[in-house]
Image (cartoon, rainbow, N blue to C red):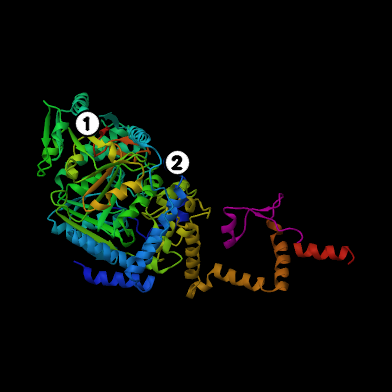
Amino acid sequence: MANSAEARTEILRRIRAATGNPAEATVIEAEWNAIQRDYKLVTSVDHEGLLEQLEDRLRDYDAGVYRCHPAEIPALVGKILAERGKETVAVPSGIPPEWLPAGMKFVEDARRDVAQIDACEGVLTSATLAIAETGTIVLQDAPGQGRRAVTLLPDYHLCLVHAADIVQTVPEAIARLQPTTHLATTFFSGPSATADIEMTRIKGVHGPRFVDVILIVG
Amino acid sequence: MSLITFDPARVPTFQVAAKGLLGDTQLRKNVRHATNVIQGKRKIVVDEMPDWQQLRESGKQIKDHTLRNLDYYLQQFEENCTKAGGVVHWARDAAEARAIVIDLVKQSGSDEVIKIKSMTTEEISLNKGLEANGIKAYETDLAELIIQMGNDLPSHIVVPALHKNRQQIREIFKREMNLPDLGDKPADLAEAARTFLREKFLRVKTGVSGANFLIAETGGVCVTESEGNGRMCLTLPETLITIAGVEKVIPRYQDLEVFLQLLPRSATGERMNPYNSIWTGVHPTDGPRTFHIVLMDNARTKILADTEARQTLACIRCGACQNTCPVYRQTGGHAYGSVYAGPIGAILTPQLQEMHSGQSLPYASSLCGACYEVCPVKINIPEVLIHLRHKVVEQDTQGIGAFNPEALAMKAMAILFTSERRFRAAQRMGRMAERPLVNKAGWVTWLPGLLGGWTQVRDLHEMPKQTFREWFEQRGTSDGK
């Protein structure tokens, strides 16, 4: 193999030759802090406005959107899955058992072979947060959300988001994620899509082609 | 990515290639349609952002700051990625990068790889290198699959197959996937790709990707995409090999808040692209067990050393400059003879090839400035184009080049312009010499010999009967002063 250490030394030498002597870490930090950031950082709508914006954006991406109170979750989950005709649904560990309606089959991901997940018709998870302005939901490797393959292989994703976890802007989301940057993180905005054919956004290539979102309020 | 590549030594100049491609009406129709749609979508989602200009300014400042401290941030990335279980490799040039990736694939024990769309791997012709070593590469992005199966070349950095319409794509898939009854609705074509690739995702043990952002602070890597093929390649294989140019590093996680707003709106006209994946080294029980990242120079440090051209490295590969460029919109991407086409390609390609080839590209522009206006990180592309034209001229007029007709003509002009007497004599001579060439309407439409290059694409007005100086002097005498 090519000598990577030698290449490293040479590339760093070239960079220093191009940019001048390396600066002190404190100087670099001060310079980074001085970067102008006049863009919008915080929410400019009330709580109801936030929910409506998220719903609007998700529908724009062709996702189904529902609202319910915590006590209504299992009934709504049961109704949505029945309407979608999903019988085998994967769940990551850490999903509150009271969310799951009785009498339906849920397969808990054992984090081994992905074939078990691939065989499921859908997946049900919670979420870390949602961004209203862009219609984005963020998933991390946390209880109730699971490893990345779980929300990728099944063709259908039912995602439950607490209203308290909705922010309006991307900067607010990034600030909330800062303490958990070590976790594998996925942002998803609607179902899988492509615009590679004549620039038409069509639903569904490899990720879930159908997405429903339940916003838990109250 | 297909096995045919743009060979810098053999591609024709932009002007020659463009002339041929302009005759392809189907291609022009496809390019016009795609760039119109994407520009329209971009405008809607950019106009709804009251802080768009502020975001652009921050994006520019972050990139500028990073490039000035590139050694610091690369080392910080290396340290944090290594701590998180990643293995960092360094490659001085394309050959070294290819060799590292090929070796890592062999070490992974696989003779096939699944690939995410990556312009960096296109830049170094990785698939050709893999194939030569008995490794089969499967492109998994829909557009890249179309390019690979059609044995074609990419023509756009975001939508590489935008020059193909649905009927053309159906023909390629029908033939390559053996699907005689395939329809031509985009959904049919996407379904065919889904079925074809799902088996590969579940079987192939090694993935290869590019990267959108390397986060120095955390050692994390961010990949943005639409289809989910990226997530498949990043998540399912046992070994993941990522290759990225050294300029892809950003200082901190917080900086994503700027780029994750600028990139999707500029690239595909979406508020957010369907998927962003961020991972840090190796995650136990989630995703690949081995993660390698190759940090590649390949002439980027040469660009860094040129302070006037350095801003080229700020590019986040959104393709907005391509969609808006009046030249690209007529010729499409292939005329540029490089995987990087359009305005950004016109400045990036010759510099990546260290000005040994691609010298015609800085001239593939009318300098209208539309690219600068849409650039999410405010790269002043026209400024760099002019800077590179200067370099090309310097190159052409050195050594034996000092005797080339253009250089000699410029020298002769300099002699004329430095003396009033000589200048006036030349004007008089010019009026006499042009006389047989001027038509009835007062235009010169044909010039002989080398000067013919000028009149091939434009007409020249005949010289005025009287110059301003002559008129001014006459006026003085007729007034009797």
User: Does any portion of residue B348 appear in the rendered image?
Assistant: no
Where residue A65 appears, as percent x and y from the top left, is 29, 30
Q: From the viewer's perspective, is B359 left or right of B298?
A: right
Classed neighbour count for the residue bearing mark 2: other residues with Cα under 10 Å, few (<14), some (14–19), many (≥20): few
Quadrant (top left/top right/bottom left/bottom right) for the N terminus of chain A: bottom left
Element at label 2: loop
Tags 1 and 2 both on a single chain: no
Q: Quick check: B85 above or below B416?
A: above
Classed neighbour count for the residue bearing mark 1: other residues with Cα under 10 Å, few (<14), some (14–19), many (≥20): some
Q: Quick check: A128 above or below B292?
A: above
* Residue nearer the viewer, B44 or B339: B44
* Residue nearer the viewer, B136 or B391: B391
Question: Dot 2 corresponds to which residue?
Answer: B48
User: Does any portion of residue B397 appear in the rendered image?
Assistant: yes
Q: What separation in Å lies between label 1 and label 2 (alpha carbons)?
A: 34 Å
The amino acid sitting under disc 1 is Pro
Element at label 1: helix
Chain holding disc 1: A
Where residue B71 appears, as percent x and y from the top left, is 32, 68
- B203 magenta-colored: no
Q: Which residues are magenta?
A: B438-467
Q: Which mark is residue B91?
A: none
Question: Dot 1 corresponds to which residue?
Answer: A70
Count how many numbered circles sit on residues in the image.
2
- B445 magenta-colored: yes
Q: Main secondary structure of the magenta part?
A: loop
Quadrant (top left/top right/bottom left/bottom right) for the C terminus of chain A: top left
Q: From the viewer's perspective, is B314 left or right of B244?
A: right
Q: Residue furthest front?
A: A218
Chain holding disc 2: B
